[in-house]
Image (cartoon, rainbow, N blue to C red):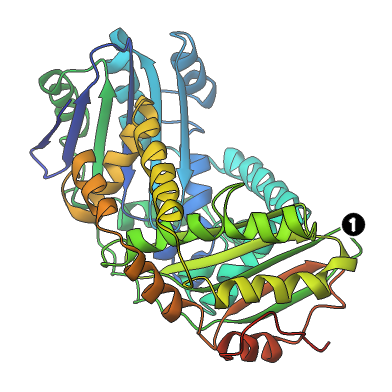
Amino acid sequence: MRVEVSRLSNGMTIATETIPHLESVALGVWIKSGSRNEDDDEHGIAHLLEHMAFKGTGKRSAWQIASDIENVGGEINAATSVETTAFYARVLKNDMALAIDILADILTDSRFDEEELAREQHVVLQEIGAAHDTPDDIVFDRFTETAFRHQTIGRSILGTPETVQSFTSKQLRTYMERQYGADRMVVVATGAVTHDAFLKEAEKRLGGFRPKADSKIPLYANYVGGDYRESRDLMDAQIVLGFEGRAFHVRDFYASQILAMTLGGGMSSRLFQEVREKRGLCYSVYAFHWGFSDTGIFGIHAATGKEDIEELVPVILDQLKHAGDGILQEELDRARAQYRAGLLMSGESASSRAAQIARQMLLFGRPVTTEELLDRLSKVTIERLTELAGRLFSDVKPTLTAIGPIGTLAPFETIGNALASSANGAQRLAV
């Protein structure tokens, strides 16, 4: 299988990958614009726009958009992230032209009807309320807000009730015209598709799209760290402790991914074994690393009862302080195998593969082969992990967010001092 890339007459990028044994096509349009691209008075507009795209065009009502795709057994959806927005569909191979016609229709001729807008604003308000009522979700919003304080990269994608209710149809159109240009868009199809046929359909429907977006580049991210705590009368506490991570482009990105897996990437990881299996201090604990275009975030999430917080946090800190000590080759090999398996398994899904290609095109301007990714993984060594852990977890500016019955959680300054300390063994934290 090989990714083929072409450009439409307006410069829009088209990429396809034929997967011969499939009967379906996964296709979509990815735009290099997400919540990070919003102005201060636009918080949440990218996500609302994604919702409104399915609420009617000049030739299709909201019901017709849904029924046209479902009449052929297909599915259509959209998603907003910090740095991208995607509109995508999956259909049987003979219905590829219909799917791209619907996607092009909502991108070029959405009506943004006022009545539909009012209904969808109400839906998003419910979504915001549901997120606030779900501590294991909202703790991550507070985490990024604290790590990147007063910056669009750290803001919740959903927006606030006040901003969401303030948006008008005119604002949606203005935002779309400013952010969506062929120079920042990638159209991808994978599965039972040929490049020439897809290119022809894409040119017919999207070749007249505006060539360039008229938006400024987001400010460079500035990780600041900090402390956020919210006491709630809950059965358990949600805690996230994090540090500045690595951007997609930098040398240590893949080492950071592997370090996260070694530390807390599964049941055999250090955190799971020490915190959950040996000590029974929480029911969930794992490490993660998120990359962005110019920065990243490395974190540990734990969910525990209030009676275990005082003992749990020092144990996690001790694991971080010694994350680079005595890394075994079998630990590295296991983490690398996990990452490799995830990469290869995602390639077995046409939808996952399309999204992967789109991300690569937007980030690197080219498709990255599986062989190249595996080669990068193979170059991660114990020495690199040891050196990386030493730099990451000695940061005296961590990010800590906690929601729930957190009265026994140690002061932020004490946690920062414990990380900076070179003392061996778990440090008892005074509350």
Which residue corresponds to the image point at 19% horizontal and 46% vertical from the top-left?
A: 372
Dot 1 amino acid type: Met
Q: Is residue 272 left or right of residue 87?
A: right
Residue 88 is situated, as x and y percent measured from the top left of the image, at: 39, 32
Residue 301 is situated, as x and y percent measured from the top left of the image, at: 64, 61
When asked about the image quadrant of residue 414, the answer is bottom right
Residue 222 is situated, as x and y percent measured from the top left of the image, at: 42, 81
| Residue 181 in view | no
| Closer to us: 60 or 331 | 331
For mark 1, what is the residue?
235
Q: Is residue 136 left or right of residue 369?
A: right
Which residue corresponds to the image point at 48% horizontal and 33% vertical from the top-left?
A: 54
Up-down relation of residue 357 to residue 378 (above or below)? above
Up-down relation of residue 394 to residue 134 (above or below)? below
When asked about the image quadrant of residue 311, the answer is bottom right
| Closer to us: 324 or 405 | 324
| Closer to us: 230 or 35 | 230
Q: Secondary structure at mark 1?
A: loop
| Closer to us: 103 or 427 | 427
Q: Is residue 174 left or right of residue 396?
A: left
Residue 181 is situated, as x and y percent measured from the top left of the image, at: 24, 50
Which residue corresponds to the image point at 20% horizontal and 45% vertical from the top-left?
A: 368
Total numbered labels? 1
When asked about the image quadrant of residue 426, the answer is bottom right
Q: Residues within 10 Å of mark 1 (few under 14, many from 20)?
A: few
Q: Can you say which quadrant of the picture contains the N terminus?
A: top left
Which residue corresponds to the image point at 45% horizontal and 73% vertical from the top-left?
A: 389
| Residue 243 in view | yes
